[in-house]
Image (cartoon, grey):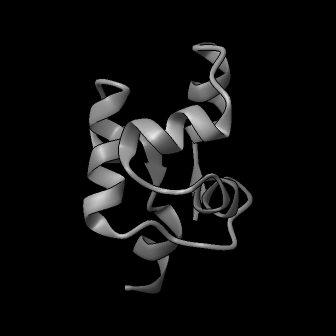
Amino acid sequence: MRTRIKELRRARKMSQAELADAVGTTRQTITSIEVGKYTASLPLAYRIARYFGLTIEDVFDFSDIDEEL
């Protein structure tokens, strides 16, 4: 799953560790989500989106899931 987390984080000049602290997870989790090795849980996706003032759909690209349906 693709995300805009890296783009959004860089726009705010934040490190992965700073974002992780802000949303209650680890830097390793943020790294894994950004490179597509891990899919965020719904609560974590919600916290990330809310932190940036966006909806989950604005941060996470679900088009690959739509194609599977």
Q: Position of residue 20 (x, y in %)?
A: 51, 45
Depth check, front residue: 10 or 23: 23
Quadrant of residue 4 in the image?
top right
What residue do we see at 37% from left, 26% from top? 52
Frontmost residue, 1 versus 27: 27
Is residue 11 toward the left or the right of residue 50 in the image? right
Q: Nearer the viewer, residue 67 or 59?
A: 59
- The mark total stands at 0
Nearer-the-camera pick, 48 or 20: 20
- Tell me which residue sits at (61%, 56%) in the image: 2
Q: Is residue 49 left or right of residue 34?
A: left
Q: Is residue 52 above or below residue 62?
A: above
Rendered image quadrant of residue 14? top right
Where's the N terminus, which quadrant? bottom right
The residue at the far right in this view is 35
Residue most extreme to the top: 12
Asked whether, in this view, residue 16 is left or right of residue 51, the answer is: right
Pick out the residue farthest to the bottom: 69
Can you say whether 12 is above or below 58 in the image? above
Identified at 34% across, 58% down, the residue is: 44
**Residue ID at (37%, 85%):** 69
Image spot of residue 48 (x, y percent): 38, 43
